[in-house]
Amino acid sequence: MSLEQIIRREIEQDGPISVARYMELCLAHPTYGYYKTRDPLGRPGDFTTAPEISQMFGEMIGVWVASVWQSLREPEAKLVELGPGRGTLMSDIRRVLCGIGIVPDTWMVETSPVLREQQRARVPDARWADTIAAVPDGPLIVVANEFFDALPVRQYVSAPDGTREVRVGVGTDGALSFGLGSLVPAGDLKDSWDEISPASDAIARALAERLELDRGAALVIDYGFGATDRPEGPTLQALRKHERADPLSSPGSADLTTLVDFDRLAAAFAPLPVSRTEQGHFLAQLGIGARAQALVKREPAQANDVADALERLTSAKAMGTLFKVLAVHSPDVLPPPGFEE
Ligand code: SAH
């Protein structure tokens, strides 16, 4: 049976399903889910994640972690990554920390068995958990790059007669198609559309509770928006082999993501102090320019590659402004670096 058949059967039995349920089946079905069956980051290309573009990205996050570590003054603090992909980011962070004599107890929160193996190859002494709640008590420094964008969202739009939830059903032509479900109370629907991720709200709240209770800080980097650059409509998109694809065709064979609503994420961390900026600014503040120069000095033949990577990570034309950075910390930790004007 294919994932599409499984989805069709569920729709036949229960009626059209929410976008969140559809995303969950496509990404996390135990047998056919996109992340469960393959290494989606395996082929470097135009659409790859920041840590796979250059070691400089992870090194700057390493500088950030080192600074928080010093402010936290907890030799037992755990370093935790949510959705570590191939383990590249953690391996780059740990190299920086090791250089200044810090070897933290490292935890990976990862549900994909395929990616756990990749992570083990790069960070053999890490430990794994399915959820943040399963990471043992104690102070934490958490990083999450392109994690929240992969969590399922419920999608709402305003129809002529009120707010309705978008659902996935079977159209008159027999293909999977988007349609509108019954009226829902508009409640806190933002604007004429909204995407709300119950999973990401729950994870952010669990993280905030942990940081309040056990102390520490978290860094979230993702493509997303705030009040000033909110897109005009829903943001669900599919990428198959690095190309834009129809999210409803061949379920389970494409990556499904949404832009992260950083205002909503920040609200879920309340009342903890939150700092926000854009990726280009953040990396520049942490010294990526100087790091690029040092790499070129050491290996002049790499000059073009280093310049390309720097451009992709920081320029407004590439990831520099579309990608947002949010830090949250317990009140006793100094405001983390990277967010100064
Ligand atoms: N951070 C990595 C990978 C991003 S892809 C990078 O920047 O390259 C998203 C990652 O989140 C994958 O490792 C995926 O398996 C993981 N993931 C998705 N949903 C998850 C969940 N609910 N719990 C834990 N990990 C999850």
Image: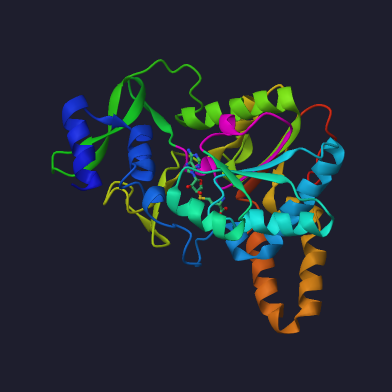
Farthest residue, direction bottom: 301
Q: Nearer the viewer, residue 78 or 7?
A: 78
Please report the residue visible at 32 percent of the width from the left and 54 percent of the height from the top.
Answer: 253
Question: In the image, 294: left or right of 131?
Answer: right
Question: In the image, 216: left or right of 320?
Answer: right
Q: How many marks?
A: 0
Q: Residue 69 in the image: x percent, y percent? A: 81, 42
- Above or below, comparing residue 315 to residue 232 in the picture: below
Question: In the image, 175: left or right of 155?
Answer: left
Q: Nearer the viewer, residue 125 or 41?
A: 125
Farthest residue, direction left: 173
Dividing the picture into quarters, in which one does residue 207 lie? top right
Q: Quadrant of the C terminus?
A: top right
Q: Residue 110 in the image: x percent, y percent? A: 51, 44
Dividing the picture into quarters, in which one does residue 296 lie? bottom right
Task: Indicate yes or no whether the magenta region holds residue 265.
Answer: no
Farthest residue, direction front: 125
Please report the residue visible at 48 percent of the width from the left and 30 percent of the height from the top.
Answer: 199
Q: Residue 338 in the image: x percent, y percent? A: 79, 47
Q: Residue 12 in the image: x percent, y percent? A: 16, 31
- Above or below, comparing residue 301 to residue 253 in the picture: below
Please report the residue visible at 43 percent of the width from the left and 38 percent of the height from the top.
Answer: 234
Question: The magenta stretch spans which residues?
Answer: 130-151
- Above or below, comparing residue 27 to residue 194 in the picture: below
Please report the residue visible at 53 percent of the width from the left and 26 percent of the height from the top.
Answer: 202
Q: Nearer the viewer, residue 71 or 60?
A: 71
Dividing the picture into quarters, in which one does residue 155 lie? top left
- Can you see residue 341? no
Task: Indicate yes or no whether the magenta region holds residue 144.
Answer: yes
